[in-house]
Amino acid sequence: MRRNSIYIICLCLAVLFAGCGKQGGRTLTSATGSIYECLVVIPNVTLSSEQLAEVGKAQLQTNDGSSYVEDISTLYDAVRAVMGADMPCMPQKEAYFKMMQVTPALFDNMLKPTRNILWVDIDDTRYTQVKAKAQREVWSTPQAVYRVQTPSADAFLTFWLEHGVEVRDWFVKQEMTRQLRFYRAATDKDIRARLNRRFGCDMLVPNDYMLLMDTTLEATSTFGLSANTHVLWACNNKGSLRRDIVVYSYPYTDSETFTLPYLNAKRDEVLAPLISAGVEGSYMGTEYKVFPPEMRVLTIDSTYTAEVRGLWKMKGGEAMGGPYVSHTWLDAVNGRVVTAEVFVFAPGQKKRNPLRQAEAILYSREQFYEKK
């Protein structure tokens, strides 16, 4: 009996620590909270008229996920205006992060394992200037903690108005990294090999994506599609939620390629003859009126990359649409431009998390060009 009791105790301990990690010799518990949620540890500070004027110059505004816009009156409001801002080019209002606030006095051991924590530490007896520190796996795993140490609320507000978007982007990157860690365990080797052969790159396409197409499109006069356009298309179709990835390349012939108008036109040129719906004559297009596509420049695997966010929609009679994100880069060795795009179709559902999960694939890109 004593031997059986010892065995049961050991088994319970093994189960207890199975989901825990170690950091510096310490055992970490599993993080609490959902993806794209952030806990802000910050004192309740009402902004002065001078501080509100600075906020006004920065054009910050907060919202609660609807068309109703709230006034900014506290330091936390200024944080939420950035961290909880609406993501661009989404069919419905969805914030970058779902926000929660707690004062430092209430930040106890129950809250410390939270997945994402922004900790604003205001203390004029300990700090003479603003210091920011980004950390991972402090009290749990996976965890991201961004701590700002500042002597005053005024000093923090100045820091936040200048660097708040950078802090938000850092938290987004941590969520992307966690997603890629999950993908890395089970990817589709065939699709990855095809990406290598066709486009000289690798991306962590999960093994629940199904290959739909790997071909060279013929030139067409209907949509103005030029010759030598290579396409690989795969999708993950689970019930009412669908994620697609399309990678295509074409010769680099125009110095204006890496501009938003050119990339928009090329997207319509390639995808219109490729993707259709149930209604005969329908084809994929880009939404330009309500939420026009937006572009920014990134560096992925040391390569200049143009990121475009926008909304896709079916034209020609089919009522379908959703958000998309594309990354475009130059394969100078082979004189071609490569675009990888993910798009989501989730009628009646929130789109942020599915889009971010698909978008993480784009950030996994590695390149190893050879002359074709």
Image (spheres, rainbow, N blue to C red):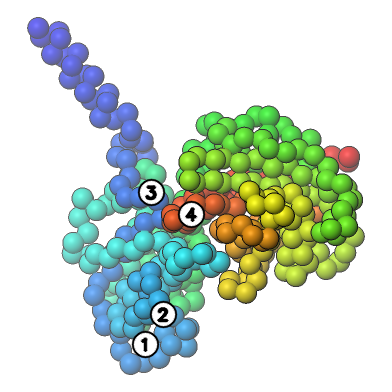
- Secondary structure type for disc 4: loop
The residue sitting at 65% across, 29% down in the picture is: 189
The numbered mark at residue 347 is 4
Vertical arrangement, residue 291 with respect to residue 39, above or below = below
- Looking at the image, is mark 3 or mark 2 nearer the viewer? 2
What amino acid is labelled 2 in the image?
A: Gln
Q: Nearer the viewer, residue 169 or 288?
A: 288
Q: CA distance from mark 1 to mark 4?
A: 42 Å
Residue that protrudes farthest toward the left in the picture: 1
- Secondary structure type for disc 1: helix
Q: Earlier in the sequence, mark 1 or mark 4?
A: 1
Residue underneath mark 2: 61
Residue underneath mark 3: 143
Q: Position of residue 201 (x, y in %)?
A: 73, 42
The residue sitting at 56% across, 40% down in the picture is: 236
Q: Earlier in the sequence, mark 2 or mark 4?
A: 2
What amino acid is labelled 4 in the image?
A: Pro
- Looking at the image, is mark 4 or mark 3 nearer the viewer? 4
Residue underneath mark 1: 51
- Mark 2 surroundings: few (<14), some (14-19) or many (≥20) residues within 10 A: some
What amino acid is labelled 1 in the image?
A: Gln
